[in-house]
Image (cartoon, helix red, strand yellow):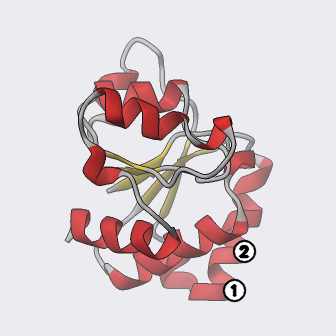
Amino acid sequence: LLCNFNQLFKVDPEVFGVWMEILSSVPDSFLWLLRLPSTAEANLRRTARAGHGGEVEGRMIFSERIDWRNHLLVKSMANLSLDNPVFNSHTSGVDILWSGVPLLTLPRETMSSRVAASLISAVTLPLTIARNMDDYKQLALRLIG
């Protein structure tokens, strides 16, 4: 179970395409996203269906925000969190690491794209920091393999 608990405005077309390639490559995988904002769900589903078919689109799970009293427990059900390279996980990155789920990131040039790499380095998991988008995809496939 792959996840990303960031607001969906952070998802750029390049990383979304890689996420769909990962789902296509691993037939029993699912991608869990927050319905935040709810209007983004239809757009992402349409994009997934157009590029990768209904079967892959059907393995996208959208949920409402998770109750804060249980959110770490619920998030711990995921196997790998996929970060957004352009605008990284901040608080959601801390939460996912605290829940025991590895966070895969790809730092870029701006501060907002390097936060998750700092978080990962602070908990000494540098193996989940990718060098480029191809490395990001290959690391994800290895980690869920």
Q: Amino acid at mark 1?
A: Ala
- Any part of residue 79 in sight: no
Q: Amino acid at mark 2?
A: Arg
Task: Pinpoint residue 76: horizontal percent, then vertical percent.
Answer: 27, 35
Furthest-top residue in view? Answer: 69
User: In the structure shown, which secondary structural element does the residue marked by tag 1 occupy?
Assistant: helix
Task: Pinpoint residue 102: horizontal percent, then vertical percent.
Answer: 29, 44
Q: Please tell me which residue lies in front, 137 or 46.
A: 137
- Any part of residue 106 in sight: yes
Quarter-of-image position of residue 120? top left
Furthest-left residue in view? Answer: 145
Quarter-of-image position of residue 123? top left
User: In the structure shown, which secondary structural element does the residue marked by tag 2 occupy?
Assistant: helix
Q: Which residue is mark 1?
A: 50
Residue under the point 44% across and 40% down: 117
Quarter-of-image position of residue 124? top left
Does 120 appear above or below 142? Answer: above
Alpha-carbon neighbours of circle 2 within 10 Å: few (<14), some, or many (≥20)? some
Circle count: 2
Residue under the point 23% across and 70% down: 142
Task: Pinpoint residue 78: horizontal percent, then vertical percent.
Answer: 30, 46
Alpha-carbon neighbours of circle 1 within 10 Å: few (<14), some, or many (≥20)? few
Does 73 appear above or below 105? Answer: above
Kindly indicate whether the residue at mark 2 contacts the one at mark 1 (C-beta within 8 angstroms): yes
Asked if residue 69 lies left or right of residue 27, the reply is: right
Q: Which mark is residue 46?
A: 2
Distance, label 1 to label 2, CA atoms, is 6 Å
Asked if residue 92 lies left or right of residue 50, the reply is: left
